[in-house]
Amino acid sequence: MKNNFGYSWRAYLIYIFLVISLFVLIYRIVSLKYIEGDFLTSKGKSMLKTSRLIPSIRGSILDRNNFPLAVSINQYDLYALKDFSKEDFKKLRNFLLLNKDFLDIKKLNKKTLIFSNLNFSQYENVKSLKLSGIEIEAFQKRYYPLGEQAATLIGFSGTDGFGLEGLENILDTELSGEAGEEIIFRNASRRPQIIKEVVQGFDKKLTIDSRIQFYAYKHLSNYIQANNAKGGSAVVLDNISGEILAIASYPSFNPNNPQRKIKRNRALIDAYEPGSIIKPLVAAKGIDMGIFSKNQLINTSPGFINLSGRIITDPKNYNDITVSEVIAKSSQVGASKLALLVGVDGLISGYKEFGLSKPPNIFFPGIAYGVINSRENITDHEVASIGFGYSMTASSLQLAQAYSVFANEGYLKDFKLFIDNFDSSYEQRVIRSDTAEDILESLKLVISDGTGSLAKLKNFEVAGKTGTSHKASSKGGYDQSKYIASFVGIAPLKSKRLTIFVSIDEPGLNNYSGGSLAAPLFAAIADDVLSYLNE
């Protein structure tokens, strides 16, 4: 009995163990199939295949003639792997003229760079060797053919491919495109399978002409250096097409140098008190409102005027002069009287119609738009100041666009920086065409009989206006030793095609006025540009 009982007990134990094992096995099968199935499947696939990104090629920035201002170039780095041999090295040495001794690199325990920046020809030659002990990694390098000439406008992108400054930054999304993705199977073929198509970056075409940009930057930098100035800007507009042909700023930087020191675009970022450049806008508003005419006499005697207890003076007593002569001689007294006749409301509305104190429709980071003193209970002296270019600020681009109104028969165009498929730039009437012609005649007097004689060109007739303004002092008031010299001109008068604006910040005290410094700078740029355009 005991033996039977013992046998029965052991049998039951075995049966129970087998049943439990069966249930465990069934549970494990179900678990592997339905609970852990997705995880194990993905784990298995990950062991059989790997994925990698397919980088997109960053779009180029081109000038109006398709000359590259920013372009991505494919370059390659050559690495030696663990099984890199002496025979491999000898084959590469013939192609690449390697200076390294093989003894320096024969004991490789990790991937090692042996040659950087292969050009495409070298890349093709090395690839044709089909060496197993090497690996070639491709990367993109951004190159800027115009260098510092356009750096403050174009900006640059970093080593990771993202735009960091200028147009490279503001257009980053369009230029970058979108990376693709591919799967590589770990089998004999290692054939890749693309699972996400790469979207290449879009090219952006500017209205900038690289040759005109070169002329503007060359002369601007030369004049600034020759006169020990702090900096400056130059803007060239095509009045007919409504396009920006050049935006130059100095000092600049070399965008191709990784150690570059960033400089701002003074033509777009800086807003300053323009001084006498503003006087023709005051006269245009007054003439257009019917308050006075270009030939109306303004009494500037005895050469100064007291407004709100402050004295405004001219270099000498001009006595009775016409409105046109107020512009030609740049009379502060005359401009003050014109501003008071127009009134503060007329001045502010007029300036805004000319595009001042409003953001230009240019896609650029941190672009300036300036301000105008419009406080309540404004004094007569403050109104006069607004009339001769103080108590207000504007950028170089804004002032250039404002003067284009006189070339475009009273219309202000919405100047473009990008070439697209849209029609010509938007325009709106600011003053009557006869008013624009009156001001243009006055600006001709500035060149022939006024402060802008050094802006004359040998082969072309031009019109324009000088400006010399004191810079504000950090201690309040104005610094009597710091100036901004400027000139804006329309050339040639036959076609009135171009408006060119130049400014020089803090020139040396031996030569600092708009007439003596900025006017000849305008002439140098205009002469080269007009010859290039065959005007």
Image: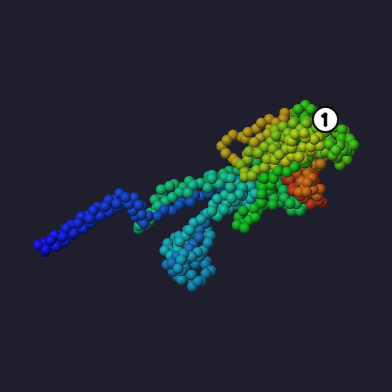
Q: In this rendering, is residue 303 above or below 79?
A: above
Residue farthest to the bottom? 103
Looking at the picture, tell me which residue is in the foreground, 499 or 266: 266
Looking at the picture, tell me which residue is in the foreground, 473 or 424: 473
Type of amino acid at the residue the image marks with label 1 = Asn
- Please give the name of the residue rendered at 75% of the width and 51% of the height, measured from the top-left corner: 229
Using the rendered image of the protein, determine whether residue 395 is visible from the camera's viewpoint. yes
Looking at the picture, tell me which residue is in the foreground, 330 or 261: 261
Screen quadrant of the C terminus: top right
Lateral position of residue 135 relative to residue 251, left or right: left
Q: In this rendering, is residue 442 above or below 163?
A: above
Using the rendered image of the protein, determine whether residue 442 is visible from the camera's viewpoint. no
Q: In this rendering, is residue 389 above or below 198?
A: above
- Please give the name of the residue rendered at 61% of the width and 57% of the height, measured from the top-left corner: 257
**Which colour style is shown?**
rainbow
Residue farthest to the front? 2
Residue farthest to the top? 290
Mark 1 lies on a secondary structure that is loop
Q: Position of residue 76 (x, y in %)?
A: 50, 58
Q: Position of residue 333 (x, y in %)?
A: 84, 37
Q: Position of residue 3 (x, y in %)?
A: 11, 64
- Please give the name of the residue rendered at 40% of the width and 52% of the height, measured from the top-left corner: 183
Screen quadrant of the N terminus: bottom left
Q: Position of residue 373 (x, y in %)?
A: 74, 37
Looking at the picture, tell me which residue is in the foreground, 306 or 55: 306
Lateral position of residue 147 relative to residue 442, left or right: left
Residue farthest to the right? 302
Circle count: 1
For mark 1, what is the residue? 295
- Please give the name of the residue rendered at 19% of the width and 56% of the height, measured from the top-left corner: 16
